[in-house]
Image (cartoon, rainbow, N blue to C red):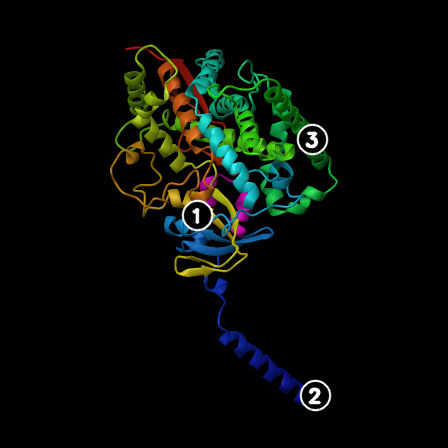
């Protein structure tokens, strides 16, 4: 017995020394950080700034660390230098993580541009690039803003939820842009049925519980049953539009100078390029455009409207920032309100700076979707092995004092200075080969909406608001402001 105990101790000592002297793998050299506090805050739906403070604290000063949330372990990147190392890699070396059936992202988004890779991604990215370039029409956006005026007029001098209002506006724009469909979402306070269906689907997709505990999606619950029935209903809506567009193109050729929606453009281009445009894949692309296009733009515009109504910032009052922006718009457009042209939008430098600062301080997506490495990649001094997932935290980069002086202050003038910054210190639309295909359209859309609203109205925060000190954000698939109400009044002409 004593011999057995002795041999056991000797064996344990040998094992200990083997492990202690084992050369660490490349992944072992990357700092570790617990994600428990972050996960707990997410599940409690705490404001985004609290979650990001917890992330920075867990990182313990590191700009890269390894952690695990739910079933997914990932290398987290918090600096522009490290972000560049991965975002500039080929889409084949650092592709997006592809989710499988049963995961809510796959079940709704499918293999659209945001979640596809390889030849499938390249084919539809090429079609989308051309389609978006032809869709850069300020006039179409401006026509929807005129509808927004009528909607705002009915609620003048009363607190209105700016995020909900921008959702209505951008959904209407995306309906026209993506597939030439008018939802009528600005005609009344009522919500069209198909938008109610869509909002329910997104309430499931956005849930942090569904991401952290994906097995919930497979439970035979009434909510899951309703989720998949709702997807079927929304799919039928999209499929019917796709088939209608196919028929229109077949029976009525479109002239080259005629403005068309994204779906029509992609269908026509696919015929010209001899590409088989699968109906299910087109559905996936339309869903990806629709979700990414209106949620992100609604968030960015809400941030902008909020800050132009807020309390003093830096050495000026935000009222002065609003007036300064309005003065620029009137100087470019004149006293009579018109829909701005592309050339006029280019002259609105301060408007552009405001929108960039809104995207910096509250990027609609706080992280860039997971990348799954196909071969080892050097990130800073570390080598991240093949098959490891990487996550880039935009929020941390946008608040990094190495790049931004007083990063928590809202200061559009920082984008008017000649100060040189790291090119990856501002990446709300990502960067590299997988950057957002709709970036130029989104910025144009926001310039048109903001400039026309500044020409028509003034706005302020209500006396009593939970957002008096700061903008409170829910942490969902995209960030969402909580109960942001503003009071719009007709602009007094000087």
Which residue, as the protein is rendered here, is positioned at the far bottom? Answer: 3
Bounds of the magenta span? Answer: 35-54
Rendered location of residue 114, percent (x, y): 53, 39
Classify mark 1: helix, strand or loop. Answer: helix
Q: CA distance from mark 2 to mark 1?
A: 61 Å
Q: Nearer the viewer, mark 2 or mark 1?
A: 1
Q: Are marks 2 and 3 in contact (CB under 8 Å)?
A: no
According to the image, label 3 marks what residue? 232
Q: Residue 251 falls in which quadrant of the image?
A: top right
Rendered location of residue 327, percent (x, y): 28, 19
Rendered location of residue 127, percent (x, y): 52, 34
According to the image, label 2 marks what residue? 1
Residue at x 33% of width, y 11% of height? 492
Q: CA distance from mark 2 to mark 3?
A: 68 Å
Q: Give 489 or 227, whichever is nearer the viewer.
A: 227
Q: Earlier in the sequence, mark 2 or mark 3?
A: 2
Q: Which circle marks residue 87 in the picture?
A: 1
Location of the N terminus (image quadrant): bottom right
């Amino acid at each position: 017995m004593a011999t057995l105990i002795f041999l056991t101790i000797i064996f344990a000592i040998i094992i200990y020394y083997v492990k202690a002297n084992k050369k660490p793998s490349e992944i072992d050299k990357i700092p570790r950080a617990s994600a428990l506090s972050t996960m707990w805050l997410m599940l409690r739906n705490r404001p985004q700034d609290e979650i990001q403070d917890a992330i920075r604290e867990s990182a313990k000063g590191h700009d890269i660390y390894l952690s695990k949330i739910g079933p997914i372990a990932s290398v987290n990147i918090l600096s522009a230098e490290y972000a560049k190392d991965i975002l500039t890699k080929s889409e084949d070396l650092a592709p997006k993580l592809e989710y499988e059936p049963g995961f809510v992202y796959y079940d709704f988004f499918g293999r659209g541009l945001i979640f596809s890779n390889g030849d499938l991604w390249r084919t539809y990215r090429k079609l989308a690039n051309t389609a978006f370039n032809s869709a850069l029409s300020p006039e179409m956006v401006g026509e929807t803003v005129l509808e927004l005026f009528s909607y705002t007029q009915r609620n003048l001098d009363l607190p209105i939820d700016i995020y909900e209002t921008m959702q209505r506006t951008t959904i209407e724009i995306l309906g026209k842009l993506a597939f030439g469909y008018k939802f009528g979402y600005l005609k009344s306070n009522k919500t069209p049925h198909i938008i109610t269906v869509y909002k329910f689907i997104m309430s499931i997709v956005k849930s942090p519980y569904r991401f952290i505990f994906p097995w919930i999606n497979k439970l035979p619950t009434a909510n899951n049953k309703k989720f998949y029935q709702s997807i079927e209903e929304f799919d039928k809506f999209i499929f019917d539009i796709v088939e209608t567009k196919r028929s229109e193109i077949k029976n009525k050729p479109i002239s080259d100078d005629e403005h068309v929606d994204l779906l029509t453009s992609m269908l026509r281009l696919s015929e010209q390029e001899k590409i088989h445009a699968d109906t299910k894949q087109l559905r996936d692309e339309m869903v990806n455009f629709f979700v990414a296009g209106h949620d992100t733009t609604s968030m960015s515009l809400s941030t902008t409207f909020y800050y132009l109504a807020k309390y003093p910032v830096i050495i000026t009052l935000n009222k002065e920032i609003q007036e300064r922006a309005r003065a620029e718009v009137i100087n470019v457009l004149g006293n009579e309100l018109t829909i701005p042209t592309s050339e006029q939008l280019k002259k609105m430098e301060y408007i552009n700076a405001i929108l960039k600062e809104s995207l910096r301080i509250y990027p609609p997506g706080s992280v860039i979707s997971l990348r799954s490495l196909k071969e080892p990649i050097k990130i800073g001094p570390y080598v991240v092995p093949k098959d490891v997932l990487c996550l880039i935290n935009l929020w941390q980069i946008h608040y990094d004092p190495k790049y931004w002086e007083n990063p928590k202050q809202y200061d559009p003038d920082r984008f008017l200075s000649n100060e040189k910054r790291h090119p990856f210190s501002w990446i709300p639309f990502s960067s590299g080969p997988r950057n957002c295909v709709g970036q130029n359209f989104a910025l144009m859309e926001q310039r048109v909406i903001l400039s026309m609203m500044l020409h028509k109205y003034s706005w302020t925060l209500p006396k009593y608001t939970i957002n008096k000190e700061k903008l409170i954000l829910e942490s969902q698939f995209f960030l969402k402001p909580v109960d942001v109400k503003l009071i719009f009044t007709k602009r007094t002409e000087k």
